[in-house]
Image (tube, rainbow, N blue to C red):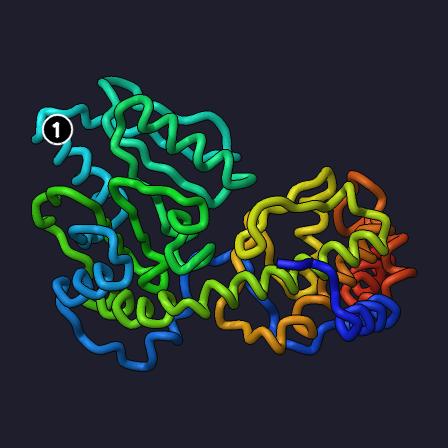
Amino acid sequence: MDLTPTGQEKELLDQIWQSQDPAEAAPLDFTQKRWPEKWAGEKPKQVTTQIFEDHLLAILKWPDWVRVYAKPSLAVVAVSKYLRSKGEPGGVVWMAPGAGKHFDPPSGAPGLAVLRADWAPGAAEVRNAASEAYARGLKLLVDESTTGFRLAPGGACQAFDLSPDMVLFGPSLAGGRDFAAVAGVGDPPDEPAKQPKQEALALAEAILVRAARPETAADQAGLGRIFLIGLNYFSARAGLSDEVSWEGPHALPRLSGKRLWAFLELAKEEGIALNPLVILDASLDLKDAPEAIWPRLARASARLKFLPQGEKAPLGWTDAAANTRCQRVDDILNSIKNTD
């Protein structure tokens, strides 16, 4: 997706940078993995596990089975036990490209690789991890708790062209409630003894309807484009392109840079909560995104430009206050003077 702003977008970016006016929209939270609970409506319809399992099978198309669990940890344990029951090793290798070395089981032979793709710098790293798992003779389970329906309608598997043995969906699909679902090929594990609560199951079924729509992944990429256009533009205008940067897919970018943490604090004060892994709020309408996102990125970038490197609030804001017209900074400085 092209990150070059259109003529109209460029005009708005210039205007926002020059004015440095605060955003009028409600605060944004780009830190939450869960899909919007409001997608489920006020009273989600009660469903059975069979209804949800059939629904997920119909959406994904490639698996042979789905099992629903009360928590992701119980799902992984169930798969591990199933492998052992078949005479295969049940140890678990945790793979998260971009987040450090793989974590092998402390004892016993591994038989299952759980692959997270949300921190991967690119497709090559994800595919290399999957290839390594198969080269070691491991069953591959792709954790789609964050990437599912965000990177593509088929999640990380579609985005990175993976053919795993299983995929895992977590609490994000149930609005943050305790929940997990595993889908896979071949013979399924036994039915779990502990099921998720009915509230979580009903939310997962209702949210799945909306999350699985092709336009959901397209909207996530569109929101990512708006966010990254603003980040690129305002960090460049502030001369901070090296201090705050990003990598990864537009729908799930990862922020980095030597002054990232100061930028995140400033962005939070301006009304946009961010973590290094940016999880875009799916409830934000694309047409409202520029006015909601860009003023906050502009002010955070401008304030970071004048913030002495290595300092944090309140004493580090002296230079920033005179240049950004930020009321909160002025309040901090006034409070300091009043206590002298």
* Residue 179 sits above or below residue 245 on the image: below
> In screen coordinates, is 4 left or right of 278?
right
* Residue 253 sits above or below residue 298 on the image: above
Where does the image place residue 73, in percent across and percent down from the top left?
A: 26, 42
Q: Residue at x 16, y 51 (%)?
A: 64
Q: Is residue 340 visible?
A: no
The residue sitting at the bottom extreme is 42
* Element type where label 1 sits in the image: helix
Report which quarter residue 76 is drawn in.
Answer: top left
Where does the image place residue 270, in percent across and percent down from the top left?
A: 70, 64
Residue at which label 1 appears: 84
Q: Residue at x 84, y 66 (%)?
A: 17
Where does the image place residue 202, in percent across and percent down from the top left?
A: 23, 70
- The type of residue carrying mark 1 is Arg
Which quadrant of the rendered structure holds the N terminus? bottom right
Report which quarter residue 36 is drawn in.
Answer: bottom left
Q: Residue at x 63, y 72 (%)?
A: 289
5 and 203: which is toward the camera: 5
